[in-house]
Image (tube, helix red, strand yellow):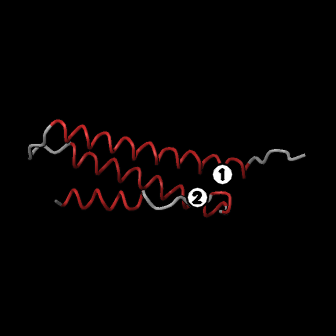
Amino acid sequence: MLQCQSRRMVEDEMNEPDINLDNLTKEELHRELEKALGELVELDELEKAIVGQTNIHMGMRKILEYRQEFELDRGRLNQRIAQIRSRLDSLDFPSDAT
């Protein structure tokens, strides 16, 4: 039960609408990057806690479902991190608009 509640909390954070990166300052982008990296660490810890449990029995189908969900979440976070880093790079090295 506790793990399900923890999982829902992480999902709620991840399901927040993405902020338009074009409107953020460099400092705000760095904060967004730190937040996304923190969520990725939290997701990994949660996956280890749920899938890596040895004191309870969990069916293989359920384990595979959890792993698939974690992989989807991890992919979304990695994509968001890549978008933020790309935006930061574009601010550091703007292309010529001539």
Counting labels gives: 2
Front position in the image: 52 or 61: 61
Q: Is residue 24 above or below residue 71?
A: below
Q: For marks 2 and 1, give the CA distance.
A: 8 Å
Dot 2 falls on a residue whose secondary structure is helix
Q: Residues within 10 Å of mark 1 (few under 14, many from 20)?
A: many
Q: Classify 76 as above or below 20.
A: above
As drawn, is 89 to the left or to the right of 79? right
Where in the figure is residue 85, as x and y percent of width and height? 60, 48
What residue did someone put label 1 on? 88
Tell me which amino acid carries mark 2.
His
The image shows residue 11 at horizontal and vertical percentages of 36, 57
Quadrant containing the N terminus is: bottom left
Between discs 2 and 1, the one toward the N terminus: 2
Residue at image location 43% in from the left, 55% down from the top: 38
Q: Position of residue 30 (x, y in %)?
A: 58, 58
Which residue: 59% across, 47% down? Answer: 83
Residue visible at 72% across and 52% down in the picture: 91
Q: Position of residue 81 (x, y in %)?
A: 53, 48
Up/down of 80 relative to 24, above or below = above
**Of the residues shown, which amino acid type is indicated by label 1?**
Leu
Q: Alpha-carbon neighbours of circle 2 within 10 Å: few (<14), some, or many (≥20)?
A: some
Which residue is labeled 2 in the image? 30
Residue 35 vs residue 2: left or right? right
Residue 71 sits in quarter: top left
Label at residue 9? none
Residue pictured at 9% horizontal, 46% vertical: 56
Give the residue furthest to the right. Answer: 98
Q: Circle 1 — which element?
A: helix
Contact flag, marks 2 and 1 (Cβ < 8 Å): yes
Q: Is residue 71 left or right of residue 54?
A: right
Q: In the rendered image, which quarter is residue 69 located in?
A: top left
